[in-house]
Image (tube, rainbow, N blue to C red):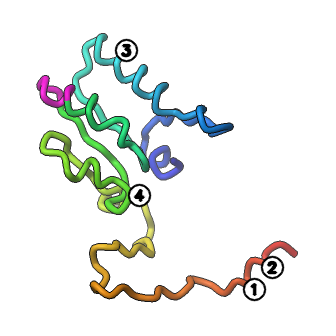
Amino acid sequence: MDALRNVGFAVFAKPKIDEDSDVDRDMLEHIDKRYREGLAALVVASADGQAFRQPLEEISRGGIPVQVLGFREHASWALASDTLEFVDLEDIAGVFREPLPRIGLDSLPEQGAWLQPFRPLSSLLTSRM
């Protein structure tokens, strides 16, 4: 969220208080409102946006360019779409100062692999003192 704000995007955020309090419905209502007002293009950032796929594809098929921003490993729904353009946040110049420590599951060997921690568990205790 902060990465998007840092590069000039306004962000709508909503806390998840219970199972029914999800931002998806609010986002879809906002997108529909903007569509009815004459949307020229649409950019949606979502880590878990499966609910967006069908409405975004319909908008795209109507001739409006639609981009989805996110991380490849969390947006297979957008990557699999024939009508949506996907942009990985890490591919946008200036968003991150250094490469993120990411490992995609598709790059692991078939038998799997143990991934070492970035820091020891004990560091969690010392950071609270």
Q: What residue is drawn where x is 35% and y is 38%?
A: 44
Closest to the camera, between mark 4 and mark 3, is: 3
Q: Earlier in the sequence, mark 3 or mark 1?
A: 3
The residue singled out by tag 1 in the image is 122
The residue singled out by tag 4 in the image is 95
Front position in the image: 58 or 33: 58
Amino acid bearing label 3: Lys
Q: Earlier in the sequence, mark 4 or mark 2?
A: 4
Q: What residue is drawn where x is 43% and y is 41%?
A: 8
In the image as oriented, which residue stretches furthest toward the right? 129
Amino acid bearing label 4: Val
Q: CA distance from mark 4 to mark 2?
A: 30 Å
Query: Magenta includes 59?
Result: yes
Query: Magenta includes 88?
Result: no
Task: Please state, as top left, top right, bottom left or bottom right, where the C terminus lies in the image.
Answer: bottom right
Q: Which residues are magenta?
A: 58-64
Q: Earlier in the sequence, mark 4 or mark 3?
A: 3
